[in-house]
Every structure is written in C-alpha cells, then in structure tokens.
Image: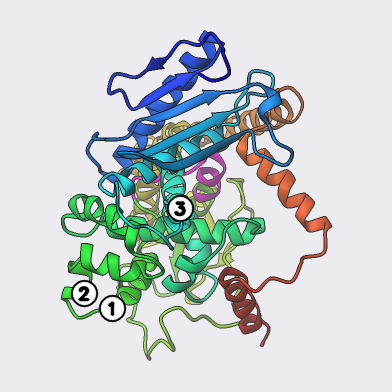
Amino acid sequence: MSQGLDMQESSIRNGQFHVWGRDRDQRRVLLSAAAETQRLFLTALRLPPAFRHPIVVQIRDSGSLRPGTRTVWSDISEIPGGFRLEINVVPENKVVPGDLWREEIVRCLLAEIILRDRSGSDLSGSDAPPPDWLLHGTLELLSYQATGRPSEAFASVFRLGHVLPLEDIFRAEPRGMDTVSRSIYRASCCGLLQMLLEQPNGSASMAALLPALASAGDDPSSAIARSFPALTASGNSLPKWWALQLATMAQPGADEILSPKESDAALSTALVFLLPADPNAASKPSPKPQGRLKRLFSRKKSAADPQPANPPAPATASTESPDSSDRSLPFSSWPDVLKRKDRAAILSRTSLALTKLSVRAHPLYRPIIADYLAVIKDLESGKHLKDLPVRLGKTNATAASLRAELSRIEDYLDWFEATQQEEQGDEFRDYLRAEDELKRPPPPRNDPISRYLDEVAREFEE
C-alpha cells in the first residue's frame, strides 16, 4: 500500500473480501462479520454465491477520518477492466458500529451485482448504485429475518389509511429523514422487495432485475415489469399488486413469534369465557358484513387504533364483548360456565383461542398456556374439578412470577445498554436520535414521504 504500512491481506474462502489493517484480531473479526452478512444477504434475496469484483476493506486510523464523515464509508469507482469497491473503517475504541458496517457491506454487495457485467458501459447520467429503495429495503429485510416480525411495521403503515405510492418510494431521499419518515420508508421498501421475491420464479427474476437497474435511470418500474412479467400478465398494474401485497403483509403470520409482553397481553385477551345472550347462539356463525367498503384502505376518522390488552389478572365482573349480544366472564368464573346448557360451545371457543395463541406465543409462555388448556379439558370432561382451584392458583402464580421476572430483566438490559456498553445499540441510538429530533422545530420538507404523511394527517383532521 502507498501508506507504507506493514499489512497482511486476509480473505474469506470465496475470495470476495480482502481486509487490510495493522490489527490481526480486527481483520479476523471484520472478515467474519463480512462473511456472515454476505450469507444472510444471499439468503434474503435468494441469490447464488457468485461474484466478479472483490470488495476491499481498509481498517484506517482516526487520522484518516474527515470532519463530518461517518466512521464507516464506501467508495465505488471504475478502473480498467471493471470496478473497485472499497469499504473504509475507522474503529472507535476498537469498536465498529454494527449498523453502519452492515449498511456498507450490503451497499457494496448490491453494487457488485448491479455492475458485474457493466465494465466499459456508458453509465453517464446514472446515479451510483445501488438505488436507495433497494439498499434500505434489503437492510430492513435482513432486520426482519433476524427478528421474525415483518408484519408489525407493515401494519403501522397500513393503518395510516392508504399506501405510499411506488413512484414516491423510488424518488424518496432517505438522507435527512426523521425517525417516523425513515421507518415508513424502509418498511415500504422492504415490502416491495418481499412482493417481488414471492412472485413465481422470484429468485431468477430478482437476479435479472439487479443488473437491469444499472441503466434503469429514473424508471425502475419498467425494469421491474420486464424482470417480473407475472406482475402484469394478469392485467393488474404494479401499483395494484403493491397495494394488495402490503395489505397481506400487514397480517401477522403463524411463524411470527410474539414477544413476552405481547404474549402476556394476548393471554389476557384469550382467558375469558364469552357468554352469548341466546344459549343456542354460541355455535352460530357470525353474520356476513353488509354493505360495501368505501375504499380498500379507508377507515372512519373517529375510529382509534386498537389498544393492547392488559396482562392476565383475575377479573371481578363480567363485561360486554365487542358483540353487544355477548358478555364475557373471567376465567376464574368457570363454575358459572358449568351451570349453563351451552357450556360445551363456550369452553370450545376459549380452548380454540388459547390453541391459536400457543402457536405464536413466546416459548416462555407456552407451558402456561398448556396448563390453561389442560384445565379447559378437565372442565369439558367434568374430571378433576375438586383440585381445580389449587391448580389454577399455581398457574396464575407462575404467570405473575414470569411477568415480574421479565420486567426486571428488561429494566436491567435497558440500564446496561444505557450505562455500561462502550458502543450503544442501534435501537438506543434511534431513540436518542428521535428524542433530539422532537426537541428541534421540524424544518420544512417537500420530499415524497413528508408529503405523504402530511396528506394522511390532513385526512384524519377533517
């Protein structure tokens, strides 16, 4: 190297990453992190492990950091015979921010695929690859794969009343976005990627789309339509596919595991007995809704978002259910249920709710749900009723103990991340950034995401 440093090159097996730097341990750690990010990247986009251009990682000292520059940045330049992709890293106290590192690795992986067969092509007038929507959509997709919770962000966008148009996603400028805008933008970009990957031959079509983006210019919709012909073969437009796909992804899947807090709230909702006013109505199907929806994504402006349920706790009085013809009893009122002629249907409804919850509940809550299901089974058969109060007391005590222990763990982790870690986590940095943004008056913005949020706000204020 021109700096005259005594460096040794380290590379992964496929040879794509070359890490340079003085510290052998740092080279090894960054090399391992790059390989793992690449593995997750290829899995998420369903791409084969092929490459043409290497990605060079330079570990630099603090003197290389220009004022206002991030500690991790990338440079992509054209050289004779191809392109050079370089990631520069300036560790702070031997620590590299994980979110910045992942972003630049994904940026270079996408750029390499897009530019792989473009050596010598005239790319003048084109923006440096990859496009922002593809980069941020891929980053969000990786995050969702790690957390297993894709529907939550999509639901928050869906509840706004209408979907962010694809044209606005393609034109948006994520740099400088506030926390809310960035969250909506990244969720929308990720939803678009998932829609494309779930199409017939999605893997092959994605492999064809990425190189086409090098010359797509300001019209990625055409490149998508050419690479994914199934989207327009049925006569539906790409925006219609996008709207329907977002509505689908806003619904939680059976494979999405609830957090402990969400499991606790859902258990509280399921631990009730719904008593129909008409004993013969327990097994009747719900009537079909009448009338037509005003529009697919509309809702009444007076309607509020659903509130999370309270944790499981012994209730003392029956309450009216959303259906005015029904009322609910707490689980501790099982003796009253057994006196009813329609007890079998009532117990079956509660059992079904708990069974559905057991599929998505956090693993710590599944034994507790199994205990409640065993109680319902005994209620249905009429067996072991004498010791039922004792068993229920133990199960309720176990749930309360678990709830308290999880609360203490959460408080400790928050304290540890805020006070003990040398490097703050991504979520904590986002929190501090959001808090700082709220203290400042918002600057006037005219980007597509801000106009979209303003339009939604005006609609709900009318």
Tell me, for residue 232, which label it has, or none: 2
Secondary structure beneath dot 3 equals: loop
Residue range of the region highlighted in magenta in the rendering:
254-266
Q: Is residue 255 magenta?
A: yes
What kind of residue is marked 1?
A: Ser
Residue highlighted by disc 3: 128
Q: Who is closer to the viewer here, 30 or 250?
A: 30
Q: Is residue 117 magenta?
A: no
Q: Position of residue 256 (x, y in %)?
A: 39, 46
Quadrant of res 144: top left
Which numbered mark, 2 or 3, is in the foreground of this view?
3
What kind of residue is marked 3?
A: Ala
Q: Who is closer to the viewer here, 247 or 411?
A: 247
Residue highlighted by disc 1: 237
Q: Is residue 328 above or below residue 354?
A: below
Residue at 46% x, 10% y is 8
Q: Who is closer to the viewer here, 262 or 62?
A: 62
Do tag 2 and tag 1 residues touch (Cβ < 8 Å)? yes
Q: Residues within 10 Å of mark 3 (few under 14, many from 20)?
A: some
For marks 2 and 1, the one nearer the N-term is: 2
Q: Position of residue 225 (x, y in %)?
A: 25, 69
What kind of residue is marked 2?
A: Thr
For marks 1 and 3, the one nearer the N-term is: 3
Report the label total.
3
Cα separation, mark 2 vs mark 1, equals 6 Å
Q: Residues within 10 Å of mark 1 (few under 14, many from 20)?
A: few
Q: Quadrant of the C terminus?
A: bottom right
Secondary structure beneath dot 2 equals: helix
For marks 2 and 3, the one nearer the N-term is: 3
